[in-house]
Amino acid sequence: MTEKKKSTRTKKDVVVTIDTPKIDVSIEKTAEGNFHAELDTERVDVQIDKTEKTLNINVEIDDKIVYEFESNGKSKHMGKGQVFKIVGKLAKYFIERGFGRIKK
């Protein structure tokens, strides 16, 4: 029986950029495995950086805009699945505490 030699593919850098009037997306992945992504919309800005050792996610929410926040039940005062209309500053606080997410 002959053994097949595995061919190893060389990893390449990948860059994807999408620019529309309402949404801008930029994704970059290097051959070393590092990852950088940016999402810019009218409601939220997100930046993600991943290296071999770290993962950083930065979400910018406008403090004065009203968002729909969905609770995940980790707060004793907010039941699971309940939806609240709150301003961005309070939404950031709740997200940092792990109480839920902004509903789409």
Image (spheres, rainbow, N blue to C red):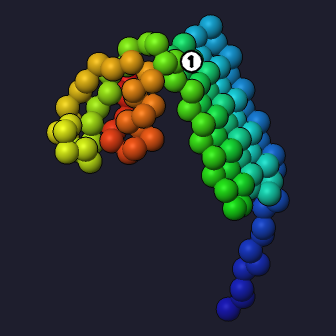
Q: Where is residue 21 in the image (x, y as percent from the top left)?
A: 62, 7
Which residue in the structure is indicated by mark 1?
41
Q: Is mark 1 on a helix, strand or loop?
A: loop
- Side of 69 relative to 49 (left or right): left
Q: In this view, does 13 lie to the left or right of 43?
A: right
Residue 88 in the image: state x and y as whole percent: 44, 21
Which quadrant: the N terminus? bottom right
Residue at horizontal 19 percent and vertical 39 percent from the top: 77
Around disc 1, counting alpha carbons within 10 Å, would you say few (fewer than 14), some (14 to 19), or many (20 or more)?
few
Q: Which three-letter amino acid code belongs to the residue tagged 1?
A: Thr
Q: Can residue 4 be seen in this view?
A: yes
Toward the viewer: 81 or 75?
75
Q: Quadrant of residue 25?
A: top right
Q: Which residue is found at the position 66% from the left and 31% from the top? A: 38
Q: Which of 101 and 74 is in front in this view?
A: 74
Indicate the position of residue 81 as horizontal and vertical percent values.
Answer: 21, 36
Q: Quadrant of the C terminus?
A: top left
76 over 59 or under it: above or below: below
Give the camera-side residue of 103 and 99. Answer: 99
